[in-house]
Image (spheres, rainbow, N blue to C red):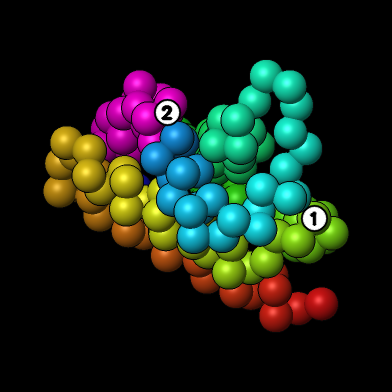
Amino acid sequence: MDSAAASRLAGQLSRQNRSLCEQVSARLLATYPELTQSLRLEENYTPIARLSEVAVERLNDLVRSVLLFDLPSLADQELRWARGMLPRSGVTPDHQMSLVRWFFEEVRRLPISSMELALTRDIEQYFLNQIRIVNQTS
C-alpha cells in the first residue's frame, strides 16, 4: 500500500466524515427501512443520525485505521464481532455488504487520485470478502 496515498485518503475520509456518513445512512434507510427498528433511537437523534453514528462512522474509522496502519486485517476482528452481534438486531450480511459498497461508492465521488482510487477498490474488496467468509463459517 502506498503510504502517502493511504495517508491522503485517510485525511480526506476524516474531513468528509459527516457528509459521507449521512449520505450512506440515508441510502441504507431508504433501501432497508427495517433497519430503523434495530436502532436504539434516543430523543436527540434522527434515524439517519443514529445509523450514521453506530454504523457508518464506525466503518469510516475502521477504514482510516486500515489505511494508516496498512493492516487490512484490523477489519477481521470487527467483522467477526459483527457476525455474532448484529443478527440479534436484525442486521444481515446483505445490510453489511450494502453499507460497505455504498460507503466506497461515496468515497470514490470525492476528489481523489488514481492511487487513492485503487486503494478504495482494494479495501472494499477485502471487506466484502471478509464479510462473506465470516458469514460462511458459523
Alpha-carbon span between mark 2 and mark 1: 25 Å
Q: Amino acid at mark 1?
A: Ser
Residue under the image location 46 percent in, 44 percent down: 26
Residue 131 vertical position relative to residue 103 in the rendered view, above or below: below
Residue 69 vertical position relative to residue 37 in the rendered view, above or below: above
Q: In terms of depth relative to the viewer, which is nearer, 2 or 93?
A: 93
Residue under the image location 66 percent in, 48 percent down: 36
Q: Secondary structure at mark 1?
A: helix
Verify whether residue 17 appears in magenta.
yes
Question: Which disc is residue 97 wearing?
Answer: none
Verify whether residue 56 appears in magenta.
no
Answer few, some or many: residues within 10 Å of disc 1's Cα (few below 14, many 20 plus, some between 14 and 19). few
Say whether residue 2 is visible.
no
Mark 2 or 1, closer to the camera: 1
Report the residue marked by disc 2: 17
Task: Give the magenta part as a residue range.
Answer: 3-20
Residue under the image location 66 percent in, 58 percent down: 34
Question: Which disc is residue 89 wearing?
Answer: 1
Secondary structure predominantly adopted by residues drawn in magenta: helix
Answer few, some or many: residues within 10 Å of disc 2's Cα (few below 14, many 20 plus, some between 14 and 19). some
Q: Position of residue 123 (x, y in %)?
A: 42, 55
Q: Amino acid at mark 2?
A: Asn
* Left or right of 106, for residue 91: right
Q: In terms of depth relative to the viewer, which is nearer, 83 or 19?
A: 19
Examine the image and state in which quarter residue 102 appears.
bottom left
Residue under the image location 63 percent in, 68 percent down: 93
* Left or right of 30, for residue 35: right
Q: Secondary structure at mark 2?
A: helix
Q: Position of residue 97 (x, y in %)?
A: 53, 64
Q: Earlier in the sequence, mark 2 or mark 1?
A: 2
Examine the image and state in which quarter residue 50 appears.
top right
Examine the image and state in which quarter residue 32 appears.
bottom right
